[in-house]
Image: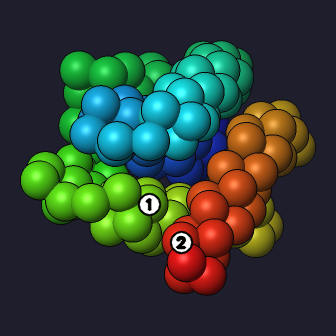
C-alpha cells in the first residue's frame, strides 16, 4: 500500500532540491570567482545524489517521484528567484542569494524532519539528504560572512 503522505513530503523536498541544483548551476555560470564557481558546481552534484536517494524512498513508499520536468505546485520555488536575481549582479549579491536559498531549503528539511507522521524509511531518507543540505547551508553561510568581512 502506498504511503501518500511520505511520497508527498519527499516529493516536495525533491522539487526544492531540483531548484537548488538549478540555482547552483546558474550561479556557477554567473559568478566571476572560479573557486566559488567550482564550489557551486560541486554542491549541485551533491544535491543530485541527495535527489536520487529521496526518489528511491518515494518509490519505496509506493509513489511516483518528482523529476526535473515536473512541477510541484506546493513547493515554493525559492531557487527560481535566485536564477532571476543573479543576472548581471556581482559575486557578493550572488552569494547572498544562494545563502538565502539555502536558508529556505534548510527550513523545508527541518519541517520534514519534525513531521511525526513520516515513516522510519522516509525519515531515514530525509536524514540522509539533510546531511547535504546542512553542509551546504553552513558552507554558504561561511562564504557569505567572508564577503561581509571585506
Mark 2 crowd level (few <14, some 14–19, many ≥20, 10 Å Cα): few
Q: Is residue 135 left or right of residue 150?
A: right
Check the image and report above or below for 58 versus 114.
above
Residue 99 x/y as whole percent: 50, 65
What colouring style does the render use? rainbow
Taking the view exactly as shown, the residue that stands out farthest to the front is 150
Q: Quadrant of the N terminus?
A: top right
At 32% from the left edge and 67% from the top edge, which residue is drawn?
A: 93
- Nearer to me, 105 or 3: 105
Q: Which mark is residue 147?
A: 2
- Of badges 2 and 1, nearer the viewer stands 2
Q: Which mark is residue 113?
A: none
Residue topped by disc 1: 95
Quarter of the image where one finds residue 141: bottom right
- Nearer to me, 49 or 59: 49
Work out how far the residue at label 2 is from the one at label 1, CA to CA, in angstroms.
8 Å
Q: Are marks 2 and 1 in contact (CB under 8 Å)?
A: yes
Q: Is residue 118 left or right of residue 7?
A: right
Helix, strand, or loop for circle 2?
A: helix
Check the image and report above or below for 47 versus 78.
above
Quarter of the image where one finds residue 57: top right
Q: Quadrant of the C terminus?
A: bottom right
Check the image and report above or below for 85 versus 100.
above
Q: Is residue 41 visible?
A: yes
Mark 1 crowd level (few <14, some 14–19, many ≥20, 10 Å Cα): many
- Nearer to me, 58 or 137: 137
Amino acid at each position: 500500500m502506498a504511503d501518500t503522505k511520505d511520497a508527498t513530503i519527499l516529493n516536495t523536498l525533491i522539487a526544492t532540491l531540483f531548484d537548488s541544483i538549478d540555482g547552483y548551476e546558474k550561479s556557477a555560470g554567473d559568478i566571476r570567482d572560479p573557486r566559488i564557481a567550482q564550489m557551486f558546481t560541486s554542491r549541485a552534484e551533491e544535491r543530485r545524489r541527495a535527489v536520487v536517494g529521496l526518489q528511491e524512498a518515494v518509490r519505496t513508499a509506493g509513489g511516483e517521484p518528482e523529476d526535473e520536468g515536473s512541477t510541484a505546485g506546493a513547493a515554493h520555488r525559492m531557487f527560481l528567484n535566485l536564477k532571476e536575481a543573479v543576472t548581471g549582479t556581482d559575486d557578493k549579491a550572488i552569494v547572498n542569494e544562494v545563502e538565502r536559498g539555502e536558508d529556505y531549503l534548510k527550513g523545508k528539511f527541518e519541517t520534514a524532519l519534525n513531521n511525526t507522521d513520516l515513516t522510519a524509511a522516509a525519515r531515514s531518507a530525509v536524514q540522509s539528504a539533510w546531511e547535504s543540505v546542512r553542509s551546504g547551508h553552513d558552507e554558504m553561510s561561511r562564504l557569505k560572512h567572508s564577503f561581509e568581512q571585506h
